[in-house]
């Protein structure tokens, strides 16, 4: 069983910055893609950014140039550096990972979510 534990959410003023962290633990052989998703009230969950184990990244158009995803494979941790935050970034942010067992069984794993509120 794999667990993802997120940290770093909170309240920030428009234009401010935050960093989210998500650490994977438990029984797995390797973790392939890791990413961040978000869900605002009344909206569907959307992809924010993803990163593969070899560092290839993808971003939602709405966060390009403002957010940066990175990961530390040795620590099984993914980060999301968020700059120039806007009110429309307010949402619950979820960490996601695709974890593989030693017998090549994959699992989609989600974190518990962390609230980010951008408000003056």
Image (cartoon, grey):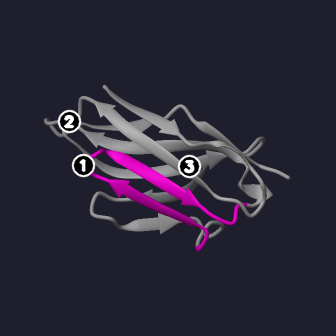
**Tag 3's secondary structure?**
strand
Q: Residue at x 24, y 29 (%)?
A: 27
Gap between marks 1 and 3 measured at Cα: 23 Å
Q: What kind of element bears circle 1?
A: loop
List x then y, in percent, for residue 50.
Answer: 45, 58
Magenta-drawn segment: 65-85
Q: Are marks 1 and 3 in contact (CB under 8 Å)?
A: no
Describe residue 64's horizontal placement relative to residue 31 as left or right: right
Asked whether the viewer can see residue 45, the reply is no
Say how many tags the image has: 3
> Real-space Cα distance between discs 3 and 2?
23 Å
Question: Residue 76, how many percent across, how many down?
Answer: 31, 45
Mark found first going from the N terminus, 2 or 1:
1
Residue on which the image places disc 3: 37
- Residues 39 and 11: in front is 11
Comparing labels 2 and 1, the label whose residue is closer to the camera: 1
Please name the residue shown 44% across and 42% down the image. Answer: 22
Q: Which residue is mark 1?
A: 74
């Amino acid at each position: 069983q794999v667990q993802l534990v997120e940290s770093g959410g909170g309240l920030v003023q428009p234009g401010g910055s935050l960093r989210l962290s998500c650490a994977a633990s438990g029984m797995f052989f390797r973790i392939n893609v890791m990413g961040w998703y978000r869900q605002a009230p009344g909206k569907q969950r959307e992809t924010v950014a993803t990163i593969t184990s070899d560092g290839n990244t993808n971003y939602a158009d709405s966060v390009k140039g403002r957010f940066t995803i990175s990961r530390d494979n040795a620590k099984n941790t993914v980060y999301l550096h968020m700059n120039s935050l806007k009110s429309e970034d307010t949402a619950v942010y979820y960490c996601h990972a695709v974890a593989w067992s030693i017998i090549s069984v994959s699992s989609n794993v989600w974190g518990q979510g962390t609230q980010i509120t951008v408000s003056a």
